Image (tube, rainbow, N blue to C red):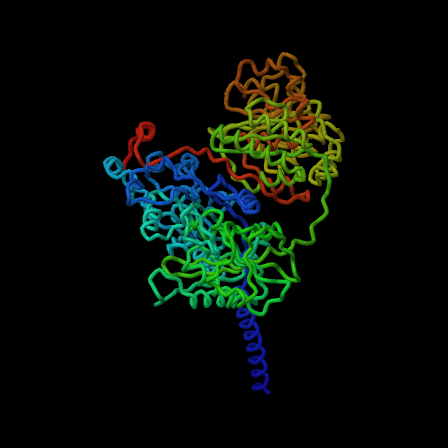
Amino acid sequence: MANEVELRRYLKKAAVELKEAQRRLDDLESRAVEPIAITGMSCRFPGGVKTPEEFWLALEEGRDLYGPMPQDRSWQRWLGGDGGSYVDEGAFIYDAYDFDAKFFEIPPIEAREMDPQHRLMLEIAWEAIERSRIDPESLRGSSTGVYLGMSSQSYEWVGLDETWSGATGYLLTGNAVAVAAGRIAYKLGFEGPAMMVDTSCSSSLTAIHQASAALRSGECSMALAGGVMVMSLPLWFIGFSRLRALARDGRPKPFAAAADGTGWGEGAGMVMLERLSDARHHGHPVLGLIRGSAANQDGASNGLTAPSGRAQQRVIQQALRNARVNAAEVDLVEAHGTGTVLGDPIEAEAVLATYGKERRPERPLWLGSVKSNLGHTQAAAGIAGVIKVVEAMRHDTVPPTLHVDEPTPHVDWSAGDVRLATTKQPWPRSGGPRRAGVSAFGFSGTNVHVIVEEAPEVTGTEPRRDTEQPLPLIVSAKSEDALRAQASRLLDRLTVDAALDLRDVSFALATTRTAFPWRAAVVASSRAEALDGLSAVATGTPASTVYRGRVGAHQNLVLLFSDRGIAVPPGMSGAYPVFAAAYEEAKAAVPREVFASQVAAFRLLESWGVRPDLVLGHGLGEVVAAHVGGALSLPEAAIMLDAPEDLDTVPSEPAIPVVSDSIGGVTSTGELRSREYWSRTRDPERRGAGIRHLAGSGATTFVDFGAMATREIGAEAFGTSPCAPVFCAEQHASGGLATVPAIAWTTGAAMDWTALYADRTVCAVDLPTYAFQRRRFFIVPDAECESEVISHGGQRI
């Protein structure tokens, strides 16, 4: 019998362990195939393109983004003579050498000697995070990874002797490819993997492939992935001219009969990646999905740099298997499509063999290449394709591929149902999610294919709770000029998009943006008030709803409580349960509206994170200050108001220092128990003594909490002190309690903004990214940069 009991116990334990092992295996398998969410995208492309929205507009309109050779890169001596380039056009980022070095706290001499590719990726890394509706500072210390595709462009050789004669050690770190990803991780405080990828033309797509694998394995929690190409020297133009491999007009003509070679372009792109389950859990936007990907190598093909059709077919088939997707379920292939007579037919045949078979007549595969718009951006080519197809799905449109006269005759197009997307056309849904394949085939022989799927539809949105309560729109930057530019960007956004809800904008500004030292807050309850306030910030003009501050040395935040109470906007109790509960509790103990409303308002502000350094009261407000400061309980406050001589307990030591208007200095228990104390506040000669005492220190920010205290005491209480009440009665009455946290934040107070919005149905929305204040940094020495070196101590490492 004992053996039977033991056997049952053993079998039960084994069954439990087996079930747990199966659960773990299921979790591992699920994680291995989980889609990777694209939560944010950023870019710089030719034609002045600085955002994915601008990029899409250029593609949708079928814009040619080519232009003349840049004249400010010292290229003339390289391009002259017979050994130069027979092409004088390309697709360039003409301001690629501009950079906001101060934002990233990089000395001018270091910025000057840093490859502009490093600089661009720093800026768009920050933008990709902000576009994911994440405060970049909140990721400091996280396991966020950086996977960056880039090749050396010999920036350090631009100046030759002029550069090396005055070079510093920054020239080494500034031009080492290995440092670029590490620099982003260093500046943003990431502790996940930081890896550089150089597989030439497939670098950025390889970076996305590796980042996706790292996310699925748990090696990092989030990842930035992308690539960059800025030509510091015209070596690619010269080399391919000697090979006679450039198109005569510098423009690739993908899969066209007129194809006569490739053309060069520049670009930089970045995506923020996260496991789909994590993105949903954190409420981050999902723009699209990396459903699956694969990478391989040409191997011993028909030439070191010649493409292999068999390898391309294999990488496509493997990517489809990894994505658990049938080839017929893919609608579009964003091809490598360089416009060469050798490469395009090989790629087209691989696409026909993998995607062109067994398709329904009404669902052909569309084939295109963004290189027709902006040239071959090499290490940035793959990321350009990914951003293109994500935007195409979001806009239900397949954009046109340019410069195609007719399909190349070197391909048997009847071998499968594949059509060149030479005109703009709608991209309808056909039962399942829309998908696209993106290819990148490296000069090195490394091939990558990625399956991108449209974002899942969002359902079950909560109904909104309407409220007329004003909310703060907070803006910050690292300089006054940047603050104005940031406000201008936000003003433009609100002006263009009338559908943006102010509550969502307020929430997004407070919770998805880093708080910098230069600050401004606009308290508004209508769009017109918001636009007027932001316009005032953008132009640097004063406005009654705008509060400004600069966080520097410590500033004491003082709340002044009034003898007459506060102007409580209608609907406060309904809009804020914390206010309602505190009001009822205070009113029950001290049946005075003046007292209860101020206590309730303070408790609400306290729940939002407002932590004053001192509280000061005038008249009845002195008792309010003593209570909220922690010196008096509610019953004790009632006794103090009605019969102070009956207070037979010793008041507590206040948690917040309490200053009386009539006495000045921190309240003592003796003062609180004295009837004389209470009578002093009514002595006109003593009014304002407490404020004068504090204002004389010159280190206090006053907030007239009661909206009447300043008028009761009189402006003379402040004398000639630079300290003054931050707002007056009229402003407070219109701005409501939202004014107080707005002002507290501009002085440097740490706010719990999520608590302020806890009782509201809000969601983060897309807002303008940081307004970088960029200036040109070029490796050839100039007087301005040299003077800045001296101002930084002349340090040369």
> Is residue 444 among the parts visible in the rendering?
yes
Position of the C terminus, as image quadrant, is: top left
Picture coordinates of residue 328, whole percent (x, y): 58, 66
> Is residue 638 among the parts visible in the rendering?
no
Position of the N terminus, as image quadrant, is: bottom right
Picture coordinates of residue 579, whole percent (x, y): 70, 37
Please count the marks in the image.
0
Picture coordinates of residue 725, whole percent (x, y): 59, 22
615 in relation to 512, above or below: above
Residue furthest to the top in view is: 685
Picture coordinates of residue 4, whole percent (x, y): 59, 86
Q: As rendered, which of 796 and 160 lies closer to the eye? A: 160
Q: Residue at x 64, y 38 (%)?
A: 497
714 in relation to 636, above or below: above
- In screen coordinates, is 429 left or right of 88? right
The picture quadrant where one finds residue 666 is top right
Q: Residue at x 31, y 41 (%)?
A: 79
Q: As rendered, which of 216 and 393 lies closer to the eye? A: 393
Q: As rendered, which of 664 and 737 lies closer to the eye? A: 737
